[in-house]
């Protein structure tokens, strides 16, 4: 095996650009090609009696044509939490997961709906068991799939594949506000959610991804 001098991220970003073009050629009516329009549709859905269900419908339409959504957002180029909209009632994030990265179990104290537009996101759903938590179920999400979580859900996230995953995460409140919890990976004990620690997890995963060379014969 030899080092080609091209990083895995370089190759994956180039491949994502090709995928955008190919998916765009197969775009369907009603898909989102404009980021502002997409966010406006989500904000409008909050007016409905069942706001989370209405948001899920908007998100389902968007991820059904992932090429159009990536035209609006740009193809994933590196791991990170990218805010598309945030106020006291609503947060819309474009979350890009590095290959094989893991995020600690955490809660939101608000409903959340997730839609995948490229790659895969595995969610482990946890429940309280005395002073710790225990795994209750798991859901594997692939491109074009949507998952809704209730306000009291505890989940952790894994990108189990060796390429970037792009996901839209919508929250019925201010994701960046204080008052949430996370659970230690080893002890499963509760502690205050540390946004900087979470952002550092993304930065470190992205750095590992950037350093990984492609090898060939």
Image: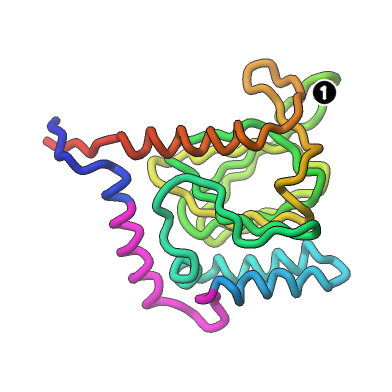
Query: What percent of the width, then of the height, locates residue 8?
Result: 29, 42
Pinpoint residue 203: horizontal percent, then vertical percent: 48, 37
Residue ID for mark 1: 129
In this image, 5 relative to 174: left or right? left
> Crowdedness of circle 1 by 10 Å Cα count: few (<14), some, many (20+)?
few
Is residue 132 one of those drawn in magenta? Answer: no
Spot the residue most to the right.
49
Question: How is this picture coloured?
Answer: rainbow
Image x and y of residue 150, in percent: 80, 49
Q: Is residue 147 left or right of residue 69?
A: right
In this picture, residue 166 sits left or right of residue 49: left
Residue 60, placed above or below residue 214? below
> Looking at the rendering, in which quadrant would you find the C terminus?
top left
Give the residue drawn at x 68%, y 74%. Answer: 41
Residue 60: give x, y in percent of width and height.
63, 67
Q: Above or below — where is 5 with respect to 12?
A: above
Q: Residue at x 45, y 77 (%)?
A: 27
Write the start and end of the magenta stretch as one range: 13-34
Q: Nearer the viewer, residue 199 or 69?
A: 199
Quadrant including the N terminus: top left
At x 72%, y 66%, the residue is 55
User: What is the quadrant of residue 32 in the picture?
Assistant: bottom right
- Residue 14 image-quadrant placement: bottom left
Residue located 51% across and 38% down the image:
202
Total numbered circles:
1
Find the residue positioned furthest to the top.
Answer: 187
Q: Is residue 25 magenta?
A: yes
Q: Residue furthest bottom?
A: 29
Mark 1: secondary structure: strand
């Amino acid at each position: 095996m030899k080092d080609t001098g091209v990083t895995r991220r370089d190759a994956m970003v180039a491949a994502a650009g090709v995928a955008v073009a190919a998916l765009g050629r197969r775009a369907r009516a009603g898909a989102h090609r404009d980021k502002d329009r997409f966010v406006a549709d989500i904000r409008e859905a909050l007016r409905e009696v069942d706001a989370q269900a209405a948001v899920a419908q908007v998100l389902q339409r968007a991820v059904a044509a992932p090429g159009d959504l990536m035209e609006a957002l740009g193809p994933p180029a590196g791991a990170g939490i990218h805010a598309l909209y945030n106020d006291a009632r609503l947060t819309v994030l474009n979350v890009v997961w590095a290959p094989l990265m893991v995020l600690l179990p955490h809660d939101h104290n608000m409903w959340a709906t997730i839609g995948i537009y490229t790659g895969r996101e595995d969610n482990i759903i946890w429940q309280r068991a005395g002073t710790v938590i225990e795994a209750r179920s798991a859901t594997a999400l692939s491109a074009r799939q949507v998952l809704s979580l209730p306000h009291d859900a505890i989940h952790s996230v894994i990108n189990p594949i060796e390429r970037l995953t792009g996901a839209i995460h919508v929250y019925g409140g201010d994701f960046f506000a204080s008052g949430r919890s996370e659970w230690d990976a080893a002890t499963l004990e509760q502690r205050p959610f540390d946004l900087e620690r979470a952002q550092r997890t993304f930065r470190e995963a992205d750095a590992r991804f950037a350093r990984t060379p492609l090898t060939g014969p």
